[in-house]
Image (cartoon, rainbow, N blue to C red):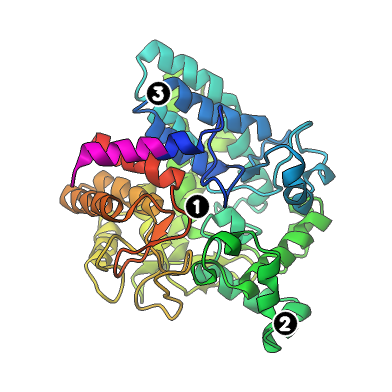
Amino acid sequence: MNEDKLLEKAKGVLKLNDRGSWMVPAADLYPHQWLWDSCFIAIGLRHLDIERAQTELTSLLRGQWSNGMLPNIIFSEGHKYHRDRELWRSYLSPYSPDGVSTSGLTQPPMLAEAVVQVGEKLKLPERRSWYKKMYPALVRYHEWLYTERDPHKEGLIILLHPYEAGLDNSPPWVSELRKHSMPWWVAAIEKLRLDGVVNLVRRDTRHIPPGQRTSNIEALSHWAALRRLRRHAYNSEAILNRPLFAVEDLAFNCLLIRANTDLQKISETIARPLPQEFLAAMTRTEAAIEQLWDETDGIYYSRSFISHKLIEEPTIAALLPLYAGTISKERAARLVQLLASRKWFKANWPIPSVPLRSSYFDPSRYWQGPTWINTNWLIIKGLESYGYQDEADKLRQKSLELVARNGLNEYFNPLNGHPEGAPSFSWTAALTIDLLKTS
């Protein structure tokens, strides 16, 4: 593997997707700014241009709602994207920002991690200034999560739509949508096998083979769930009063635990203590994650907020408690064992998004099997934090070998390494840079 050549290719992708103060994930398929994409992008950019990495993150704050929410999408301007903006209609909420069109939902809380990663590249005086700049928005966002999405103060954040999980069509969400939120008309379309018509209005399947994206039925279910949230003007309280489905998502809550720890680091560095109520909420989340453990299967699952039962559909999220960093060494060891099992996560290439044993496993379909560099990056960090340096190094090298051989795509087939999804994908390029620079 020629690391210098790979580095130059990754830089080229970021240059291609740069829009000045922020980057698109991929030019044709994803023409807007996405929340956790920009966080991963900044983590790679910090090795190349620290000021540009900072700008990538501060640009996210223009979309922050007055109640503290950070939306998963900030839409590009211009008539070309009018339809995208009207699909969401963020202006229906009194909390949405003036002059900026956004989505009405959030995405995994990666911002605190990205802020700290960028801060580590700065000398202490500049780091303090950087943290002071980002701290108020971060606190408001985390407080919004606990105020709006943990109404009973149980510790686990509730998500209202698959888009908020980032892993849009992963099995737990598909399962919950089918059980609790499949509209009659979507069921009728599926029964009559008329779903192929949907491709006429889908942007993604114009650029990417349909077999690599969410199915049309899943896409219709996502759209129907979005329409319901829009009708409630994205008011979490109103939606949770009569929820059709809501999920205590494992991946999201693991990332939140790590983000809370990062926020504490920021707080200590700038000597601004976090509110005691907030610290108590953080502690509850660390304890509550253990409620998602299934001793029989030896794995963590997401949980239905409606039934309070575990959704027994395993995904790569089962390994993310390693990234959270608060589980016991014994539990961590059991998760690491899954990496070596052909029934679970051992494939020819880095960790697939769904275990090979899953009935949902499809090596090419979005979050139902392919290998993603960002989730593998998270697991590398988790392995390192628990002292599994050899396993982390092997996963790092395998990830770099994958992109060196097959390109900087959105995701990859874990069986043969074939590149799937959008080519020239920004977070794949950015995290490749980070893996190269931190190896």
Q: Are marks 2 and 3 in contact (CB under 8 Å)?
A: no
Q: Given the image, on which type of amino acid does mark 2 rest?
A: Ile
- Measure the alpha-carbon separation of dots 2 and 1: 34 Å
Label the magenta part by its dominant secondary structure: helix
Q: Mark 1 or mark 2, which is nearer the start of the sequence?
A: 2
Q: Would residue 265 be visible to someone looking at this image?
A: yes
Q: As drawn, is 62 to the left or to the right of 125?
A: right
Q: Which residue is mark 1?
A: 253
Q: Given the image, on which type of amino acid does mark 1 rest?
A: Asn
Boundaries of the magenta span: 1-12
Q: Given the image, on which type of amino acid does mark 3 rest?
A: Asp
Q: Which residue is mark 2?
A: 189
Q: Comparing marks 3 and 1, which lies closer to the viewer?
A: 3
At 29% from the left edge and 49% from the top edge, which residue is drawn? Answer: 380
User: Which numbered marker is on residue 436?
Assistant: none
Q: Are marks 2 and 1 in contact (CB under 8 Å)?
A: no
Q: Mark 1 or mark 3, which is nearer the start of the sequence?
A: 3
For the residue pair 49 and 177, the one nearer the viewer reads as: 49
